[in-house]
Image (spheres, rainbow, N blue to C red):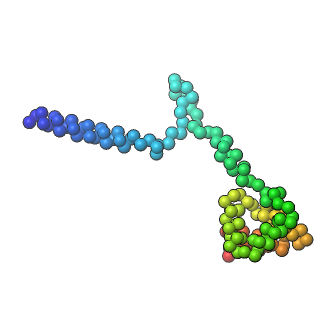
Amino acid sequence: MRLTSILSVTVVAICLAACSAIEDFDQTKDVMNDSPVHSHDLTAKRLLRAHQENGVLAEERWNFNLSQLTKKKDAKKLAKALMADHKLAKAAYISWEHHPFTLKQLDDFLKLASRKTNGEKYNQLYNGYMMHLGFTGV
């Protein structure tokens, strides 16, 4: 009887050890904030993934000015098309929101599209984009 007790205690201990080892095995959820600079240096530590230059370049790639890419004739066509089709304007608002397109850039584009009225002809586009961004109380 003594042998069966020892054997059962051993099996339980092995199961507990295995369960805790399996639980700790998944290290994908653990975040490693720092590591020692040298293997023998325990005091000096540095952050991992400190330089993310590719992310910065990816953000700068989308930072463009639409008025610099289009000519006056093309800007006028695009502004008229956006004014004529409400669904197209909504799609443009979503695109402008996800790719950083500021209100200043939109204002410059609308001024390019209608130089005589200084962009006032297309105020509906400007106001619609402001409402889409949630800057108005409507």
Residue 48 coordinates in the image, percent (x, y): 57, 37
Quadrant of the rendered image containing residue 101: bottom right
Looking at this view, is 99 or 19 the one in front? Answer: 99
In the picture provided, is 11 more to the left or to the right than 47? left
| Depth check, front residue: 31 or 76 | 76
In the depicted structure, whether residue 40 falls above or below residue 118: above
Q: Where is residue 16? Give x, y as percent.
A: 28, 41
Question: Is residue 108 shown left or right of residue 18?
Answer: right
Q: Which residue is rendered at x = 53% and y = 33% of the image? A: 35
Q: Does 44 appear above or below 91?
A: above
Q: Is residue 111 visible?
A: no
Q: Position of residue 25 (x, y in %)?
A: 39, 40
Tell me the residue at 57%/28% (across/down). 37
Q: Residue at x 86, y 66 (%)?
A: 73
Q: Quadrant of the C terminus?
A: bottom right
62 relative to 33, above or below? below
Q: Is 55 positioned to the left or the right of 77 in the image? A: left
Position above or below: 98 against 114: above
Q: Name the one closer to the observer, 119 or 30.
A: 119
Q: Determine which quarter of the picture holds residue 50.
A: top right
The answer to whether residue 35 of the structure is visible from this angle is yes
